[in-house]
Amino acid sequence: MRTGVIVAAHPGVEDLAVRAEELGLHSFWVYDTPMVHGDPFVALSLCAKATSRIRLGIGVTSPALRSAPAAASGLAGLNALAPGRIICGVGTGNTARRTLGMRPTTAARLEEFTAALQDLCAGRSTEYREGDRVGDIRFLHTGAHVNTADPIEFVVAALRGPKAAAVAGRRGTGLISFGLLDPAGWRALHDARRHAARATPHDPDSHPDSYVVTSLHLLDEDEDPHGDPARDATGHLVMSLLVFAADTPAFAGRLGPEEGEAVRRLLDRRGTTSTAPDRHTKLYPNYLGRIAPRDRDLILPSLMNTLALVGTRDDLLTRITALEQAGIDELLIQPVIDPPTEMAQLAELLT
């Protein structure tokens, strides 16, 4: 299985990209969460100039964040800096929209956006609509400005539902999912993508890739799998689920008693409620950042085991093999404690 890294955009991110390339990792991704992290196009421009081989991904942008012309211009501009090395993840904007106190967009709008980006980034015209006005648009500045000759890889973000996977099938794209380590869940996504692809003419020889985002903690000998080091290494992933549950009462209601209690404690500590109009301002600061020691009790073993890879070398290889057999092509980790060391661990584990 291939390996990669995903991080938040910040000054110096290009140094991590250089180290990832030196370690032989396949891809380096940056989140697109405007009100929480830095800008991915700025960050990946620095990474493009500092590297020569590693693929560079945005994970993920959305029509609820950026217009198709603006996103396509950014992508084709990156493609001019790093020809043929750009990956664009697209999604409904689940997290990025919630950090604004807004709802994600629809699968239908996601599909229109993906199609428009595919057309524009390949140098084709596409239909563009604003209100009642509609017309065809295309790049009017090519050559040195943007690169529409080298292909850009597109992947659609999906969880367990089939709608986004069906978009990927109809558009001939890959898939990316956050914290989905259940092989059965991945087989269901792949089935939904294949079923949707049957009715759409695509290159029959193409095999779009699937990516999973998680965190990884390799246990030392006799280390507690649920001790502080393991909780610190995986806590950002677990906390993302708890924050989503705190922001989404319908989802929180489907959790077990222990997980539901953790959500209640989180809301109490942040001084908000699941229905407060400004709850996003209390829940999302430091989103996907290293957790505070006082929050370690919220990092439940049940959620660590579901969302993250924690174990001995043999344990991890067994779980990764099961994911590979379910059709996963690349494992992406988000390091938060010591990124260079965690990236080196990942590279060593799968070589």
Image: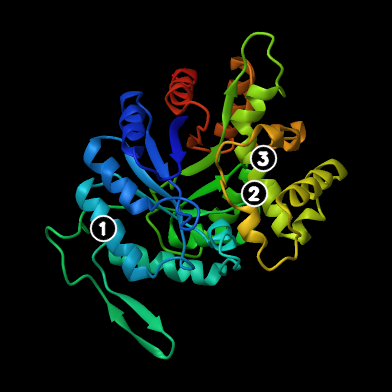
Amino acid type at mark 3? Val
Report crowding for label 2: few under 14, some 14 to 19, many 20 or more residues within 10 A (C-alpha): some
Relative to 296, say whether 83 is above or below: below
Q: Is residue 153 visible?
A: no
* Mark sitting on residue 76: 1
Q: Residue furthest top?
A: 221
**Quadrant into which the C terminus falls:** top left
Q: What whole-number distance in Å separates the C-alpha atoms at marks 1 and 2?
A: 33 Å
Q: Would you name the residue on which mark 2 appears?
A: 188
Residue at (45% x, 18% y) in the render: 348
What is the secondary structure assignment of the residue under circle 1?
helix
Residue closest to the far right: 257
Q: Nearer the viewer, residue 210 or 221?
A: 221
Q: Where does residue 55 sit, x and y in percent of width and height?
A: 33, 40
Front position in the image: 17 or 83: 17
Which residue position holds label 3?
A: 238
Q: What is the x, y in percent for residue 119?
A: 32, 66
Image-based side of 13 in relation to 190, left or right = left
Q: Are marks 1 and 2 in contact (CB under 8 Å)?
A: no
Q: CA distance from mark 2 to mark 3?
A: 23 Å
Instruction: Give the distance between the C-alpha atoms of the residues marked 3 and 1, in whole angstroms.
Output: 34 Å
Residue 285 in percent (x, y) is at 58, 50
